[in-house]
Every structure is written in structure tokens, then in C-alpha cells.
Image (tube, helix red, strand yellow):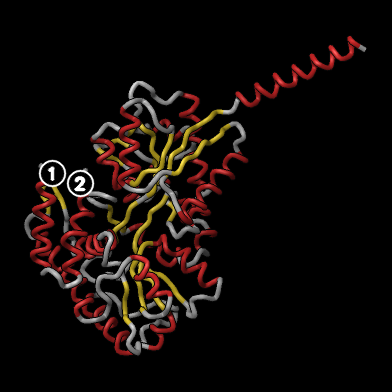
């Protein structure tokens, strides 16, 4: 009996050793992201699904505070050889990350090893992922601003086409006429709502940059901000927005939550905001809390060229000083990035347009509404200038808060606001 127990103990020990080896065989990768709300829920689900398909890789994920705190933490940790193996990153912030030596570039061969190539991505997205000819991030999506609309109110004003989409909106004069008609027909309701109040001018920047780009304007080039006739185009863009408020077609000093509530309560016929609010509309509609049919389309072309501000969530690898990513971890990171890209139809449910074209061009995406109705903007997307002072949570956004937003609300004339924006950002480049 004593010998039997000895054999059992030995077998158990071997089994435990086997289990230990299996556990050790897993490649552990540290992941940081800034994804909260619906984005966070969807990414966690993607990570869980990935690990079921790839049991040899374990992702230890941490969500940090969005904006400046995230990018500061990434920069400081990489400088001392710490931080994640992979992280989410906005393409608009790549220039800052590259300038501080925080990011490690990807090579073509690394992408090819997991079946990714340049041809898989939209040109605007792919270009924004490069700095000085090197690829510093792999795009996951294109997220932009869109025009949300109340079909019932547009139909009442004679502005809804047979296809269920707005009609007669192209051109600033036509759009303004539509805003007036919606206001006149709305029993005291607004034609449009947008976030144009505290705490920041992010929405004002996105709409301003859209209208500047539609004129063929360039915000920054060769180290000069709003040089030449771009200053006049910028003033024209800001004046257009200020006029909407001055005419009473949209309310002034509206906070972000209030701008959404005006639309979802039926008190504003249209709403300009990011695609990230699509889940809000979808959920309210499912709960029968909207009380009207809604849709979303690209922001109309109000000037000469179709163009819309855009940014992208992407994946990047930090350049950890003295602690480069190990080959096995790099392979696991690349495998993770490729898998999530190829399964990004689930990410699209957050309102985003997948950057990976085989998904965006798939039958599954074509039936995804309203995403498919505004997917064309992926080809006309304009990213913020490649600069350390532009992009999310940047000095350009601060200037929009300090100067552009007051101009939209009639507290400053557009010319002064644009000139002060130019001067402040030009000084920031020195």
C-alpha cells in the first residue's frame, strides 16, 4: 500500500509539472488602453474572444484615463523601460509620440508575418499612421463626425428623400435654408444641436476643421499656421458655424450631454457629433425611448470639396528604453493586432468604420446601419495636421476652447478668434 501511494504521489507530481509547463507555455502580453463606455465593453469582448481562439496567448489588460494622462503615462513609463507590450493610440497623437521617442515602428515584414499589408487599409488612415515615412501604428478604425437626423421632423419640413435620407443639403446656402425651414416648422424647436459649450472645444474643432478642409484649406504647412489665404478660409468656416447660433437655428453654450439630449428628446431635428454616439441612439431606439425614426449620414459638403475631420484608434508598441519587446511577445502582439483587425465587425457596432477594408467591404458591414450609410466618408476623411501641437487633447483643441468656441457663441468675432488661434499655435511651434 505504501508503494501504491508513492506511485500515486509521483504521478500527481508529474501531472502538476505538466500543468505548470502548459501554463508557462502561454505568452503573456501587457495591454494598455483608454477605452471607456461602449468602446471599453466591446474591446473587452474582443479580447476575450481572441484568447479563446488563441489559448497560447494571455492578455493582461488595463484601462487608463483617456487624453493627456494616458499619453503622459505612456511617455514616462517608456523612458524608464517600463510600460505595456501593446497599447491603443490615436493616430492624431503619433507625431508627439515619435518626437519624444516613445513609439517603436513596425516593419513591412512584421505585418506580412500576420497577413497584413498596406492594401488592406484606407489611404487616409494608412498615411496618418506614418511619420517621416515609418509606420508607427496599425489602424483599427476611422471615427469621424456625422449628421444625425430625425426622419419625422425632416419629412414634416419636406427635407426627407424617398430613400429616407436628407435631401437638398449640399452647399452652405442650401443647408442654411434647410436649417431655417426646420426651425420654422419645429414649433419652437431647434434645427440643429452641437456641443459648443464647456468644458472643451473638441466638437467645435472637429466641425471647424471639416469646413476648412471642404474649402481646400490647410491649417498648418511647413511650420506655418493658417498661412496665406488659409486664414480667410478659416474665418469663413467659423463664421458659418457662428451664423447657425446667431440665427437661432441652434442653441448657444451647449454642453456635450445637453447637445445629445436635445436631439434624443426631439427638441433638435439634427445633431452633429462623432460616430461613437451611434450606440446611444441604437440603445434608446431599442428601448422605445426615442419616439422617432433616426438616421446618420456624412456631414454635407457645404463648400467645394467633400471632406470630414477624422481620427483613428490604432495599436502601437512603446519604445521602452533598455527593455525592447522580446521576439515571442512581439509575435503575440502582432497576432493579436491582426486578429482584432480581421474581427473588427464587432468593433463597428460602436459606430466606427473598420480600417481593415476586407471587413468594411464585407456583406456583414453593408447591412450594418447606419454605419453603411456614412462609410463613404472613409475615402474623404481628413486627419489633423501631423504636428506635436494638433490631435486629441492638444494645444489645437485648447485654442478651439479659448477662441473658436466663444466665436461660435457670439462672444467674439470670428476674425479675431482665428487670428488669436493662429498666433497662439504659431508660438507653440517655436
Residue drawn at x 46%, y 55% is 37
Of residues 242 and 127, the one drawn nearer to the viewer in this rendering: 242
Residue 9's spot in the image, x, y percent?
A: 80, 16
Please say if 157 is above or below 59. below
Of residues 260 and 148, the one drawn nearer to the viewer in this rendering: 260
Residue 165's spot in the image, x, y percent?
A: 41, 77
Residue drawn at x 30%, y 45% is 68
Of residues 414 and 212, the one drawn nearer to the viewer in this rendering: 414
Provide the residue designation for mark 1. 429
Residue drawn at x 41%, y 70% is 296
Residue 85's spot in the image, x, y percent?
A: 43, 32
Question: What is the number of the mark on residue 161?
Answer: none
Provide the residue designation for mark 2. 389
CB atoms of marks 2 and 1 within 8 Å: yes
The image quarter containing residue 153 is bottom left
Of residues 34 and 179, the one drawn nearer to the viewer in this rendering: 34
Name the quarter where the N terminus is drawn.
top right
Q: CA–CA distance between discs 2 and 1?
A: 7 Å
Whether residue 127 is visible to the viewer of this picture, yes or no, is no
Amino acid at each position: 500500500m505504501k508503494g501504491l501511494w508513492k506511485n500515486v504521489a509521483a504521478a500527481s507530481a508529474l501531472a502538476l509539472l505538466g500543468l505548470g509547463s502548459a501554463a508557462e507555455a502561454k505568452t503573456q502580453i501587457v495591454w494598455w488602453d483608454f477605452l471607456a463606455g461602449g468602446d471599453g465593453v466591446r474591446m473587452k469582448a474582443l479580447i476575450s474572444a481572441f484568447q479563446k481562439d488563441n489559448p497560447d496567448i494571455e492578455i493582461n489588460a488595463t484601462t487608463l484615463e483617456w487624453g493627456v494622462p494616458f499619453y503622459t503615462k505612456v511617455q514616462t513609463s517608456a523612458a524608464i523601460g517600463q510600460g505595456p507590450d501593446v497599447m491603443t493610440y490615436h493616430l492624431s497623437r503619433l507625431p508627439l509620440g515619435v518626437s519624444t521617442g516613445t513609439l517603436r515602428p513596425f516593419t513591412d515584414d512584421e505585418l506580412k508575418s500576420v497577413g497584413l499589408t498596406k492594401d488592406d487599409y484606407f489611404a487616409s488612415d494608412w498615411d496618418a499612421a506614418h511619420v517621416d515615412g515609418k509606420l508607427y501604428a496599425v489602424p483599427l478604425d476611422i471615427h469621424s463626425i456625422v449628421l444625425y437626423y430625425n426622419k419625422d421632423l425632416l419629412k414634416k419640413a419636406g427635407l426627407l428623400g424617398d430613400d429616407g435620407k436628407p435631401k437638398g443639403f449640399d452647399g452652405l446656402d442650401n443647408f442654411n435654408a434647410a436649417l431655417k425651414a426646420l426651425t420654422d416648422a419645429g414649433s419652437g424647436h431647434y434645427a440643429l444641436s452641437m456641443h459648443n459649450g464647456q468644458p472643451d472645444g473638441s466638437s467645435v474643432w472637429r466641425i471647424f476643421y471639416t469646413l476648412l478642409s471642404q474649402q481646400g484649406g490647410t491649417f498648418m504647412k511647413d511650420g506655418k499656421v493658417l498661412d496665406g489665404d488659409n486664414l480667410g478660409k478659416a474665418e469663413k468656416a467659423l463664421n458659418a458655424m457662428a451664423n447657425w447660433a446667431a440665427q437661432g437655428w441652434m442653441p448657444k453654450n451647449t454642453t456635450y450631454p445637453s447637445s445629445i439630449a436635445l436631439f434624443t428628446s426631439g427638441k433638435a431635428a439634427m445633431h452633429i457629433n462623432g460616430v461613437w454616439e451611434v450606440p446611444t441612439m441604437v440603445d434608446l431606439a431599442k428601448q422605445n425611448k426615442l419616439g422617432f425614426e433616426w438616421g446618420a449620414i456624412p456631414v454635407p459638403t457645404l463648400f467645394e470639396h467633400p471632406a470630414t475631420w477624422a481620427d483613428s484608434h490604432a495599436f502601437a508598441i512603446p519604445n521602452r528604453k533598455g527593455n525592447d519587446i522580446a521576439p515571442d511577445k512581439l509575435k503575440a502582439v502582432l497576432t493579436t493586432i491582426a486578429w482584432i483587425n480581421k474581427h473588427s465587425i464587432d468593433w463597428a457596432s460602436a459606430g466606427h468604420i473598420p480600417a481593415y477594408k476586407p471587413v468594411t467591404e464585407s456583406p456583414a458591414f453593408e447591412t450594418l446601419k447606419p454605419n453603411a450609410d456614412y462609410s463613404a466618408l472613409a475615402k474623404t476623411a481628413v486627419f489633423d495636421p501631423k504636428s506635436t501641437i494638433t490631435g486629441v487633447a492638444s494645444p489645437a483643441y485648447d485654442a478651439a476652447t479659448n477662441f473658436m468656441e466663444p466665436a461660435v457663441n457670439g462672444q467674439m468675432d470670428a476674425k479675431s478668434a482665428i487670428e488669436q488661434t493662429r498666433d497662439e499655435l504659431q508660438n507653440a511651434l517655436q
